[in-house]
Image (cartoon, coloured by chain):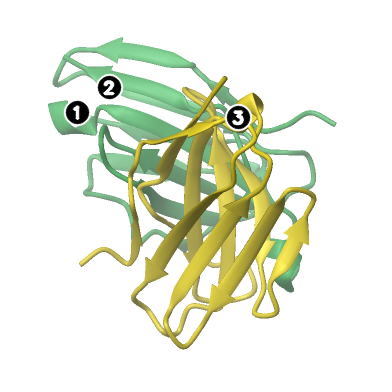
Amino acid sequence: RKEVEQDPGPFNVPEGATVAFNCTYSNSASQSFFWYRQDCRKEPKLLMSVYSSGNEDGRFTAQLNRASQYISLLIRDSKLSDSATYLCVVTRGFGNEKLTFGTGTRLTIIP
Amino acid sequence: EAGVTQFPSHSVIEKGQTVTLRCDPISGHDNLYWYRRVMGKEIKFLLHFVKESKQDESGMPNNRFLAERTGGTYSTLKVQPAELEDSGVYFCASSPTGGGSGANVLTFGAGSRLTVL
């Protein structure tokens, strides 16, 4: 079983719609959680960190459920520029420990 | 501020040859990481330097891979001899010193795409 599981998609969503991704992690010792975004043939870039209390950044909302060991990302009012692969990432600590990636969820926003 | 720079962006070599990938981290970042994405798989950790020391090399696939970071600045990753399964994108990332949740916010380079024929 992979340490971080994501639905690979693809998700094809009309512009303006709301889309949600989930990710599950198997290691209950995981401490830090992130969503990264990766455009085609580009490097991963941090989208947002995910905290137990949940956090919001503009149209993006991330939630963490430690009891069920899943992380979610909600994108409201989706834009064409949101088309990318969204990577769920966990680490076992708060410092400089290695990142464990999911395979990513591919999102395409349709005009 | 310059980002993480990787060279070459793409390398095509034959099985059995040697390739050396280079990474220049963000200036002042003590932490330097190598990751790899093989086609169809997730990005996987290879190793972590703190300055010139290997902090964690648990992800290195085998002894055909050699990473160095002499002087604690740029790093090289050598694959010798290369095999077909080494094909993929090799990402370098760096992060600043210190603990706390901000410490593991990595900045990635654009990657070096390796194709072994």
Q: Residues within 10 Å of mark 2 (few under 14, many from 20)?
A: some
Q: Could you tell me residue B72's position as x and y percent?
A: 65, 47
Quarter of the figure with residue A37: top right
Name the residue that disc number 2 marks. Answer: B18
At 78% across and 54% down in the image, what residue appears? A57
Three-letter amino acid code at disc 3? Glu
Q: Could you tell me residue B94's position as x and y percent?
A: 64, 47
Name the residue that disc number 1 marks. Answer: B81
Q: CA distance from mark 3 to mark 2?
A: 47 Å
Q: Secondary structure at mark 2?
A: loop
Foreground label between 3 and 2? 3
At 42% across and 62% down in the image, what residue appears? A23
**Chain A display color:** yellow
Quadrant where the N terminus of chain A sits is bottom left
Q: Residues within 10 Å of mark 1 (few under 14, many from 20)?
A: some
Name the residue that disc number 3 marks. Answer: A15
Q: Secondary structure at mark 3?
A: loop
**Which circle marks residue B70 in the picture?**
none
**Chain B display color:** green
Q: Nearer the viewer, residue B52 or B26?
A: B26
Is B114 positioned to the left or the right of A92 in the image?
left
Q: Is residue A106 visible?
A: yes
Three-letter amino acid code at disc 2? Thr
At 71% across and 63% down in the image, what residue appears? B103
> Are the two marked residues, 1 and 2, in contact with CB atoms closer than 8 angstroms?
yes
Q: CA distance from mark 1 to mark 2?
A: 5 Å
Which is nearer the N-term, disc 1 or disc 2? 2
